[in-house]
Amino acid sequence: MTTTTAHTDSIRPTVKPIDHREGTALAAVAYARFADVVDTLAESDWDRPTDCEGWTVRHLVAHVTGAMRSAASLREMLSQQREIAGRVK
């Protein structure tokens, strides 16, 4: 397991907030990097445990992918929220 840490004081300390265009570009890079990592997984990796107790690599990839889909589409975000609300009842 490799862990990368970024100190928050080094991330755009006094610069204007990120606008939508820049945020979209940054997200595209992050999503592509994530996909590159997922592409390196062997069949045997999917059921391996992660640092998140009770979660396998498969669980974590599904969670992150769902979050990416939600962030990319208002319609998808609302659909996911309705699905969760239906399970909570």
Image: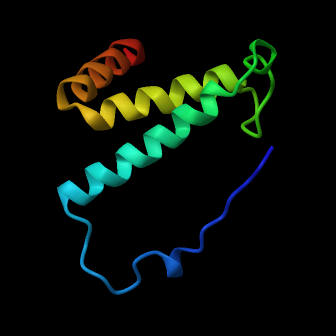
Residue 16 lies left or right of residue 51; in this view the side is left
Q: Return the x and y of residue 35 as percentages of the image width and height.
A: 53, 32
Residue 88 lies left or right of residue 37; in this view the side is left
> Split into 4 quadrants, where in the image is the C terminus?
top left
* Residue at image coords 43%, 26%: 66
Residue 66 lies left or right of residue 69; in this view the side is right
Looking at this view, is 22 or 61 the one in front? 22
* Residue at image coords 66%, 64%: 5
Looking at this view, is 83 or 3 the one in front? 3
**Image label count:** 0
* Residue at image coords 40%, 18%: 88
Q: Is residue 31 above or below residue 61?
A: below
Q: Quadrant of residue 36?
A: top right
Q: Return the x and y of residue 26 as percentages of the image width and height.
A: 36, 54
Task: Give the color scheme: rainbow, by chain, secondary structure or one colour.
Answer: rainbow
* Residue at image coords 19%, 32%: 74
Q: Return the x and y of residue 58 as percentages of the image width and height.
A: 65, 20
Q: Is residue 62 above or below residue 26?
A: above
> Split into 4 quadrants, where in the image is the N terminus?
top right
